[in-house]
């Protein structure tokens, strides 16, 4: 982006899992604590199963993992697991990727406004921000449970309510790319995450380390 655009309000909207941190192992641990108390649940889930759910909405995860249960019960199981997860992550946070703190500070100094939009439950983004330990860097955030809307709608809402003139979404999956396009924002692919995007085919910039984001946004 050219320097002449610095008078515009520019926003970077961030995904969480596979973009800011990796919390797969601790999320799996927390869920299994809860699931082991439920006789009607068919055993523990694996880290690979959890990894395959990241990026999906809460309801999609319930259907994927507990589809053998009646709908009201699968939603109840999900609710209990996710509430415990939020509490667990406060004491056992995920692993923030290298360079995230320093990069976010550099982006703020360069005039970018920072936000988070994720398909998660209430409290999860707050856990990530607590682990990040940099209060005030991220100005606003929206999760699926806040609105019960798809990620594209929430990205658009974030841009609109923060009155952004220009926005770019940073995520690590094909669903993130689709959401950004639905919202009408630019997209940068976090290729170090859990991703499945062919950046060359999709004609989107790719970063292989989070700290590469500083340069990537300059080249948009």
Image (cartoon, rainbow, N blue to C red):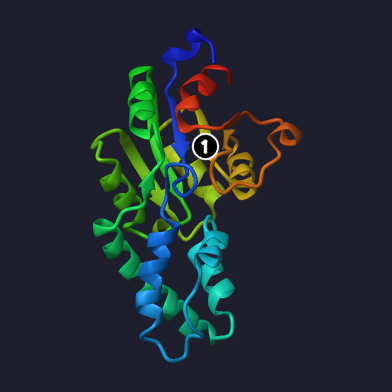
Compared to residue 156, the image places residue 212 above or below, namely above
What residue sits 48% from the left and 55% below the top?
Answer: 119
Tally the marks.
Answer: 1
Q: Quadrant of the C terminus?
A: top right
Which residue is rendered at x = 36% and y = 85% of the image? 37
Q: Is residue 165 visible?
A: no
For label 1, the SS is strand
124 versus 165 height, above or below: below
Q: Position of residue 170 (x, y in %)?
A: 52, 37
* Residue plotted at (34% across, 41% down): 140
Residue at the spot x=53%, y=82% of the render? Answer: 71
View extreme (top): residue: 4
Quadrant where the N terminus lies? top right
Is residue 189 shown left or right of residue 6? right
Residue 123 in picture, x, y percent from top left: 31, 57
Whether residue 43 appears in this view of the structure is yes
In the image, taking residue 209 as reference, residue 32 lies left or right, namely left
Q: Position of residue 98 (x, y in %)?
A: 40, 35
Of residues 154 and 68, the one drawn nearer to the viewer in this rendering: 68
Q: Quadrant of residue 182?
A: top right
> Residue lying furthest right in this view?
201
Q: Residues within 10 Å of mark 1 (few under 14, many from 20)?
A: many
Front-lying residue, 47 or 187: 47
Of 200 and 45, the residue lying toward us? 45
Seen from this angle, which residue lies furthest bottom? 39
Reading the image, the residue beneath label 1 is 170
Q: Position of residue 111 (x, y in %)?
A: 37, 19
């Amino acid at each position: 982006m050219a320097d002449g655009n610095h008078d515009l309000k520019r926003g970077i909207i961030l995904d969480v899992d596979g973009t800011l941190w990796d919390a797969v192992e601790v999320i799996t641990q927390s869920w299994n604590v809860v699931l082991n108390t439920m006789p009607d649940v068919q055993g523990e889930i694996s880290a690979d199963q959890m990894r395959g759910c990241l990026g999906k909405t809460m309801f999609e995860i319930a259907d994927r993992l507990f589809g053998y249960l009646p709908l009201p019960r699968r939603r109840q199981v999900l609710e209990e697991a996710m509430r415990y997860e939020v509490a667990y992550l406060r004491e056992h946070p995920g692993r923030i990727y290298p360079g995230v703190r320093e990069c976010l500070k550099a982006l703020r100094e360069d005039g970018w406004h920072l936000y988070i939009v994720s398909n998660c439950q209430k409290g999860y983004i707050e856990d990530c921000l607590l682990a990040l330990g940099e209060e005030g860097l991220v100005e606003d955030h929206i999760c699926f449970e806040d609105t019960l809307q798809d990620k594209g709608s929430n990205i658009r809402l974030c841009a609109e309510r923060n009155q952004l003139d220009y926005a770019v979404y940073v995520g690590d999956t094909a669903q993130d790319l689709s959401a950004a396009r639905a919202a009408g924002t630019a997209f940068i692919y976090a290729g170090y995450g859990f991703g499945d995007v062919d950046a060359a085919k999709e004609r989107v910039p790719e970063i292989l380390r989070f700290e590469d984001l500083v340069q990537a946004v300059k080249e948009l």
